[in-house]
Image (cartoon, rainbow, N blue to C red):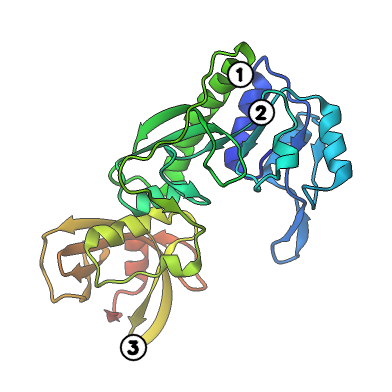
């Protein structure tokens, strides 16, 4: 059961393993793009490629859907980036229903664990498989794998790394459940519990009054989606910008605080505790480009906040 690319990679790993997938559950096709044509989820496209039975229920409690799930006679349900399941669904398989979550639970329960790990400047994260219960991301843990987060790593890059180790832990969990060698353990918290709520456009608005590290983490934590954004003035005209990539030089002072300037073909911003060098950006109505390309196109322009 899953929807996005992250779940598709896990589906592919199981498909290549000795375990047999007897059905795939995903969201209904949704209109997308300018033409608003119906678009299938990444998981559905993969399931079609493998000629697997596909279920796209609008209501997870629908009696006919429940009956179809029971007819599959699956030993276990695997959930990756899907909707919250009702008890009538997750209690069906004899070996339980487990979820793959992209954090070291109980830290970062919620919809966007990869984003929030980087937004909060974490140096490590990981993946967890756990048995689903009636609450969100609170079930007993089966397995965990830890991974380091690079100092300049983006959410997109970390997503790909976690997807790879996710494939490993999914198969280890399935093997363990098949052999009855796994012992489910209660989640235990050490220190403050951090959550991973859904992201909104407001999450990406840059506040240049906060420490540079916070801004830097916001930019990489929201790359590639939904992107950090701000407003710059070009010769006094306000323009919306997405800031896709930047570097932060702590302690460096070259200009007045909040002065926007060009140096070494980069768009730079003097912060209170260092300099933010913008290396990749996107002006409203334009395509995403390197800062040096943007600067060349606006050589005689006065930039300001």
- What residue lies at 77% left-to-right and 47% top-to-bottom? 60
Q: Position of residue 267 (x, y in %)?
A: 27, 67
Image-based side of 302 in relation to 83, left or right: left
Image-based side of 259 in relation to 140, left or right: left
Q: Is residue 166 above or below residue 265?
A: above
Instruction: Classify mark 2: helix, strand or loop.
Output: loop
Q: Which residue is mark 3?
A: 236
Of all residues, the one furthest to the top in this rendering is: 179
Q: Tag on residue 177?
A: 1
Instruction: Classify mark 3: helix, strand or loop.
Output: loop
Q: Nearer the viewer, mark 1 or mark 3?
A: 1
Q: Disc 3 or 2, which lies upstream in sequence?
A: 2
Foreground residue among 136 and 58 = 136
Q: Position of residue 259 (x, y in %)?
A: 20, 76
Please indicate, yes or no, whether residue 282 appears anywhere in the rendered image.
no
Q: In whole angstroms, how far apart are the C-alphas of marks 3 and 2?
A: 61 Å
Q: Position of residue 156 (x, y in %)?
A: 46, 46
Decide: few, some or many residues near mark 3? Use Cα within 10 Å; few <14, some 14-19, many ≥20: few
Image-based side of 83 in relation to 212, left or right: right
Query: Pointer 2 and pointer 1: residues touching (CB < 8 Å)?
Result: yes
Q: Disc 1 or 3, which lies upstream in sequence?
A: 1
Of all residues, the one furthest to the right in this rendering is: 64
Q: Tag on residue 105?
A: none
Q: In whole angstroms, how far apart are the C-alphas of marks 1 and 3?
A: 63 Å
Instruction: Classify mark 1: helix, strand or loop.
Output: helix
Q: Which quarter of the rendering shows the N terminus?
A: top right
Q: Position of residue 39 (x, y in %)?
A: 74, 53
Decide: few, some or many residues near mark 1? Use Cα within 10 Å; few <14, some 14-19, many ≥20: some
Q: Which residue is mark 2?
A: 96
- What residue lies at 44% left-to-right and 39% top-to-bottom? 105
Q: Is residue 201 above or below residue 108?
A: below
């Amino acid at each position: 059961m899953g929807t996005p690319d992250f779940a598709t990679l896990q589906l592919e790993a199981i498909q290549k393993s000795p375990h047999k997938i007897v059905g795939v559950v995903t969201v209904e096709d949704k209109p997308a793009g300018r033409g608003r044509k119906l678009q299938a989820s990444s998981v559905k496209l993969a399931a079609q490629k493998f000629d697997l039975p596909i279920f796209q229920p609008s209501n997870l409690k629908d009696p006919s859907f429940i009956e179809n799930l029971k007819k599959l006679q699956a030993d276990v349900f695997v959930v990756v980036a899907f909707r919250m399941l009702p008890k009538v669904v997750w209690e069906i398989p004899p070996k339980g229903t487990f979820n793959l979550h992209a954090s070291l639970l109980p830290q970062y329960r919620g919809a966007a664990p990869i984003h929030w790990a980087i937004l909060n400047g974490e140096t490590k994260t990981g993946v967890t498989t756990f048995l689903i219960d009636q609450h969100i991301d609170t079930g007993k843990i089966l397995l965990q794998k830890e991974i380091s987060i690079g100092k300049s790593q983006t959410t997109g890059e970390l997503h790909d790394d976690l997807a790879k180790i996710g494939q490993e832990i999914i198969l280890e969990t399935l093997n363990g459940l098949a052999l009855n060698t796994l012992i489910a353990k209660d989640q235990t918290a050490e220190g403050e519990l951090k959550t991973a709520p859904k992201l909104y456009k407001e999450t990406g608005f840059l506040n240049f009054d906060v420490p540079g590290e916070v801004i830097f983490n916001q930019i990489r934590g929201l790359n590639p989606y939904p992107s950090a954004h701000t407003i710059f003035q070009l010769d006094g005209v306000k323009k919306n910008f997405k800031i896709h990539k930047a570097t932060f030089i702590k302690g460096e002072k070259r200009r007045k605080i909040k002065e926007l300037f060009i140096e070494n073909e980069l768009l730079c911003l003097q912060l209170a505790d260092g300099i933010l060098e913008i290396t990749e950006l996107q002006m409203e109505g334009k395509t995403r480009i390197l800062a040096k390309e943007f600067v060349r196109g606006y050589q005689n322009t006065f930039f300001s906040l």
